[in-house]
Amino acid sequence: MSEISDRIRIHTGDITKLKVDAIVNAANSSLLGGGGVDGAIHRAAGPELLAECRTLNGCRTGDAKLTKGYRLPARYVIHTVGPVWQGGGKGEAELLASCYRRSLEIARDHSCQTIAFPAISTGVYRFPKDEATGIAVGTVNAFTQQNSVPESVIFCCFDEQTAKLYREAVAALGGAR
Ligand code: ADP
């Protein structure tokens, strides 16, 4: 795990393996499971996760909801619904920023000191990776400057190419301090 600043780290690997207080799921609005990172999280957490998700009545795009982590090493899963990329004129950037903010607010309100994010919306939802990375890093950096909890935020990248984009975006902030 490369340590970019005291509070923001970049990790390349599978988010379901991380022993943190909360991992964030890039879910869909039904919260009833899907492919990509969502499928991986449900497989690793076990059927109890889907059972709890069924009680939540879905989630709006840009918002987030918390469940327990069940068989995951993480204590909680924060399910957020990223925007589907439709060309950039449908409020996609603001909705993606809202996913990061709402997830961090919920983590803070549950006293989570460590939280890990996947690259929300950059898979099946086709958000351009460059722009999504800038939004992710900018929004998290702003939040950590205004809040002491969560203490540590991990960007969990599934591949090295994505990790490189994150390192560049963090470097552009001057080490994210
Ligand atoms: P979305 O529907 O929000 O686009 P996806 O799951 O399709 O969500 O993709 C979001 C990102 O999560 C992609 O960059 C993908 O490479 C990454 N990803 C997929 N599986 C995992 C995993 N197990 N751990 C971390 N990241 C993952």
Image (spheres, helix red, strand yellow):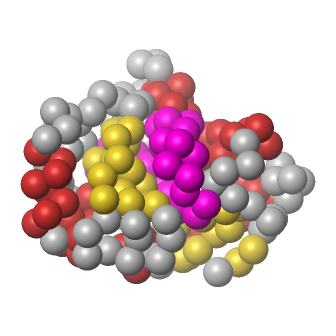
Q: Is residue 96 above or below residue 3?
A: above
Give the residue at x 42% y 19%: 90
Pinpoint residue 161: horizontal percent, then vertical percent: 56, 70
Range drawn in magenta: 99-126
Position of residue 85 measured from the top left corner of the image (x, y, whole percent) = 38, 34
- Determine the residue positioned at 24% across, 42% down: 28
Quadrant of the rendered image containing residue 12:
bottom right
Image location (x, y in percent) of residue 129: 52, 50
Magenta span has 115? yes
Position of 36 relative to 148 (above/below): below
Residue 89 seen = yes
Nearer to us in this view, 147 or 32: 147
Q: Could you say which quadrant of the image residue 69 lies in?
A: bottom left
Question: Horizontally, is 172 left or right of 10 in the view?
Answer: right
Instruction: Give the total of numbered labels.
Output: 0
Residue lying at 63% horizontally and 54% vertically, measured from the top left: 150
Is 153 positioned to the left or the right of 50 in the image?
right
173, 164: nearer the viewer: 173
Tell me: 157 left or right of 36.
right
Q: Residue at x 66, y 46 (%)?
A: 140
Q: Closest to the observer: 18 or 90?
A: 18
Q: Is residue 175 left or right of residue 123?
A: right
Q: Is residue 76 magenta?
A: no
